[in-house]
Image: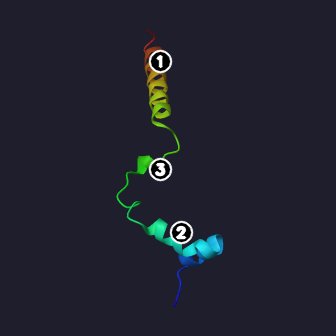
Amino acid sequence: MDKSAWDQEIDQKWGAQAEERREALKGPMWEGMPVHQFSPLSREVRIRLMMLMMGVLIGLLLWGLNI
């Protein structure tokens, strides 16, 4: 049985649990999941960052217009 590099890497990292890990990684749970669910930032933090960026943009606009 010829193993791919990906399978060999999992075997090296996980040893006895390699087969379980492989199934967990291939499982349907990962398929079709939106990318944003992998984001390390929580929803609140992202909203605050967006608000901060909007404030900075508005500030730069007003400064540029000399209001």
Looking at the rendered image, the quarter that the C terminus falls into is top left
What amino acid does circle 2 point to?
A: Arg
Residue 26 percent across, percent down from the top left: 44, 68
Residue underneath mark 3: 38
**Is 42 drawn above or below residue 15 in the view shown?**
above
Indicate the secondary structure of the residue bearing disc 1: helix
Q: Are marks 3 and 2 in contact (CB under 8 Å)?
A: no
Instruction: Identify the residue at horizontal 57%, vertical 74% (top origin).
Output: 18
Q: Compared to 39, does 20 lie above or below?
A: below
Q: Is residue 9 visible?
A: no
Number of dots carrying numbers: 3
Mark 1 in CB contact with mark 3 (< 8 angstroms)? no
Taking the spot 53% from the left edge, 75% from the top edge, the residue there is: 19
**Tag 1: Cα neighbours inside 10 Å, few (<14), some, or many (≥20)?**
few
Residue at left 47%, top 34%?
Answer: 46
**Which mark, by number, is residue 12?**
none
